[in-house]
Image: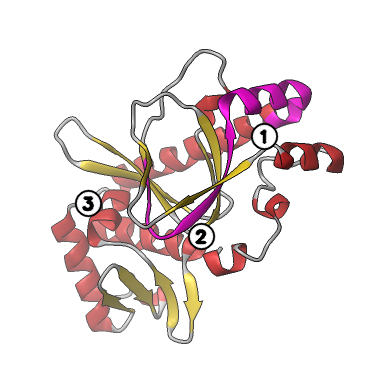
C-alpha cells in the first residue's frame, strides 16, 4: 500500500490485522491506548538486541528491518510497509530482545503500544494474542519460502521475486509504472545475492526496458518482462 494512501486512512484500518475479530468497542479501546511515533528518513527506532519495549504498526512510510550477520554483512529481513506489525516480542511476559534493527527508509509514522500496555490489553482481549500469533506465523512462512527460493531458484529469479514483492506491497503507482524506493544493497540482501549480482541483474532489465533506475529507487515499467529472455 503506498504511504500516501495510508496517511488518509483511519488508524483502525491501518491496524486491521492486529485488531481483527475484536469488537468495535475493543478496537476503539486498543487504539485509544496507543501513541504516535514519527521517524525521519534514516532514523533508527531500535537496534537488534535491545529489549522489546514496544509493539509497532507502520502507519505511513516504510521501515527497514535488518541485522548484522556474523561476517559483518547486513542482512535485510524485510521492508515494512503501512499495516505491517513488528516488535512482537513485546507481548511475551519474560523480557525478549528485538531480533533486528528498525530504520526508517523515509519519513514514517508508527502506531505504538508499550509492552506493559499491550500485555494488559491482551489479557482483556485474548483475540489480540491470537492475531499476533497469526502475524508471527505469516512471517515464518515468508522466511520459509525465502529459504526455499535460495535452494531452488536462480539469482535472477530471486531478485525478480524480491522486487515484484516490494512493488506489490510498498510500491507507489505512477504514470510510467510502479516506483520502489530501495537501494541495490537492500535489494541484494532481500534476494540473498551479492550487491554486484543485484546491480548486474537490474542493469540487464534496464537495457530490456523492463525498468528504469534512479538513485535509491527502481521504476518497474514492465513486471512481466523481468524474467523474459
Q: Give the quarter of the image for residue 136.
A: top right
Magenta span: 102-128
Q: Mark 1 or mark 3, which is nearer to you? A: 1
The spot of residue 209 in percent (x, y) is 30, 84
Residue at x-position 38% and y-position 30%: 99
Helix, strand or loop at disc 1? helix
Mark 3 highlights which residue?
193
120 is within the stretch colored magenta: yes
Relative to 210, 164 lies left or right: right
- In the image, taking residue 94 as reference, residue 34 lies left or right, namely right
Q: Residue furthest bottom?
A: 175
Q: Residue 44 appears in which quarter of the rendering? A: top left
Left or right, residue 129 beside residue 189: right
Q: Earlier in the sequence, mark 1 or mark 3?
A: 1
Cβ atoms under marks 3 and 2 closer than 8 Å: no
Question: Whole-Å distance between the Cαs marked 3 and 2?
Answer: 21 Å
Colouring rule applied to residues? secondary structure
Q: Which mark is residue 70?
A: none
Q: Which mark is residue 131?
A: 1
Q: Left or right: where does residue 74 sit relative to residue 180?
A: left
- Residue named by callout 2: 169
Q: Which quadrant: the C terminus?
A: bottom left
- Position of residue 55 relative to residue 41, above or below, is above
Instruction: Tell me whether the residue at label 1 lies in contact with that at label 3, contact meaning CB atoms closer than 8 angstroms.
Output: no
Disc 1 from disc 3: Cα separation: 33 Å
Say which quarter of the image contains residue 13: bottom right
For mark 3, does the 10 Å Cα neighbourhood hold few (<14), some (14 to 19), or many (20 or more) residues?
A: some
Give the percent coordinates (x, y) of residue 79: 41, 52
Amino acid at each position: 500500500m503506498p504511504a500516501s494512501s495510508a496517511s488518509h486512512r483511519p488508524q483502525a484500518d491501518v491496524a486491521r490485522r492486529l485488531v481483527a475479530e475484536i469488537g468495535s468497542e475493543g478496537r476503539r479501546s486498543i487504539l485509544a491506548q496507543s501513541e504516535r511515533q514519527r521517524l525521519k528518513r534514516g532514523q533508527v527506532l531500535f537496534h537488534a538486541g535491545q529489549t522489546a519495549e514496544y509493539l509497532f504498526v507502520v502507519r505511513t512510510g516504510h521501515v527497514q528491518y535488518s541485522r548484522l550477520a556474523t561476517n559483518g554483512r547486513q542482512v535485510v529481513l524485510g521492508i515494512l510497509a503501512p499495516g505491517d506489525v513488528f516488535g512482537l516480542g513485546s507481548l511475551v511476559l519474560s523480557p525478549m530482545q528485538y531480533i533486528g534493527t528498525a530504520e526508517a527508509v523515509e519519513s514514517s509514522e508508527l502506531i505504538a503500544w508499550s509492552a506493559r500496555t499491550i500485555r494488559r490489553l491482551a489479557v482483556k482481549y485474548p483475540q489480540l494474542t491470537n492475531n499476533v500469533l497469526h502475524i508471527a506465523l505469516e512471517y515464518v512462512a515468508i522466511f520459509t519460502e525465502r529459504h526455499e527460493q535460495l535452494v531452488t531458484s536462480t539469482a535472477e529469479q530471486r531478485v525478480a521475486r524480491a522486487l515484484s514483492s516490494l512493488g506489490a506491497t510498498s510500491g507507489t503507482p505512477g504514470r510510467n509504472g510502479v516506483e520502489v524506493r530501495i537501494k541495490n544493497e537492500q535489494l541484494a540482501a532481500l534476494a540473498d545475492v551479492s550487491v554486484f549480482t543485484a546491480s548486474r541483474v537490474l542493469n540487464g532489465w534496464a537495457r530490456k526496458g523492463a525498468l528504469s533506475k534512479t538513485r535509491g529507487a527502481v521504476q518497474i515499467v514492465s513486471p512481466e518482462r523481468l524474467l523474459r529472455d
